[in-house]
Structures are given as structure tokens and as C-alpha cells.
Image (cartoon, rainbow, N blue to C red):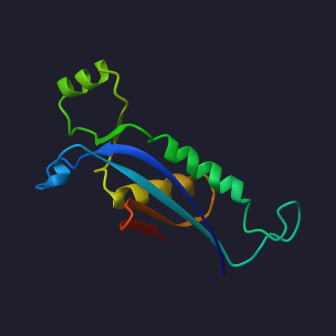
Amino acid sequence: MYSLKTAAAFDSAHFLAGYKGKCSNIHGHRWVVEAYVSSPGLQDSGEKRGMVMDFSDLKKALRSLADSFDHALIFEKGSLREKTLEALAEEGFRLIPVPFRPTAENFARHFFEVLDGQGLGVKRVVVYETPDNCAAYEV
């Protein structure tokens, strides 16, 4: 089995609504996302002969997705009051509501599903919240 891996990173803030602990407060991370693609064989013809896929295709897709979350406050839809959202928007903050609790586990699944939906044949996504702590989603 052949395997490729690429990584991308983004900086953002989040909080965990309803959590009893430090992570209930807005805080930031340098999120690192690793995407893995695997294949039992290599392409046998054309310009991609001898490759699982072109690394640049995988890198471009992952970096684009990571960049879409960069330097923003990521929050679960419905977890902030409308007045709070209006005040933050009025101040010019970049706000990204997501339909899930913004945990490393949920980000791993989200990145997996988006990349897989692009036909990249992703097999595993790992999201590091800190250099020592990560979550993975795989098939």
C-alpha cells in the first residue's frame, strides 16, 4: 500500500460552549492538519505515471481549506447571542459559524469529509490542536 501525506496550518480562536473548564473561554491555537491518501497501486500511464496522485493537487486542496479558517473566531452555530455576534461583526472580526462543536475531533472529520468530497481519496486526517495533542478521523 502506498501512502502520501501533506500538512497545512492555520491560526484561529474558538471556545467550547457548555464546557466546564478553561476551554469554555475564547482562546487560540495554531491548528496543524495532516491529510493522508493511500492506494494499493500507482498510476501506470500519463504524466502522473509512477504516482499515487500529484502532491500539488493534495497540497492545494488542503491549504485552501485550512486558509478558509485562518485568523478567525470559529464557533458552533447557536452558541453566541445575536447581540454578541452583531457587536463582534461591527468591530470587524472575522466570524465563522460551524454546524459542530469546534473540537479537534470534529475538525478532523470535517476536513476529511470536505477533502473526500473533492474526490481525493483521503484515508485519514489528523488535526493537532497543540504540538502534543491531536485527533484523527479515518475510514
Quarter of the image that includes the N terminus: bottom right
Q: Residue at x 63, y 54 (%)?
A: 59
In the displayed structure, 75 sits above or below 124; it is: above
> Residue 103 at what x, y percent from top left?
31, 55
In the displayed structure, 102 sits above or below 39; it is: above
Q: 76 or 63: which is nearer to us?
A: 63
Q: 134 or 43: which is nearer to us?
A: 134
> Would residue 1 appear left or right of 49 to someone viewing this image?
left
Q: Residue at x 28, y 39 (%)?
A: 77
Q: 136 or 113: which is nearer to us?
A: 136
> Residue 99 at what x, y percent from top left?
33, 45
> Would residue 30 appear left or right of 91 to someone viewing this image?
right
Q: Which residue ends up furthest to the bottom in the rendered image? A: 1
Q: Which residue ends up furthest to the top in the rendered image? A: 90
Q: Quadrant of residue 75?
A: top left
Q: Residue at x 46, y 57 (%)?
A: 32
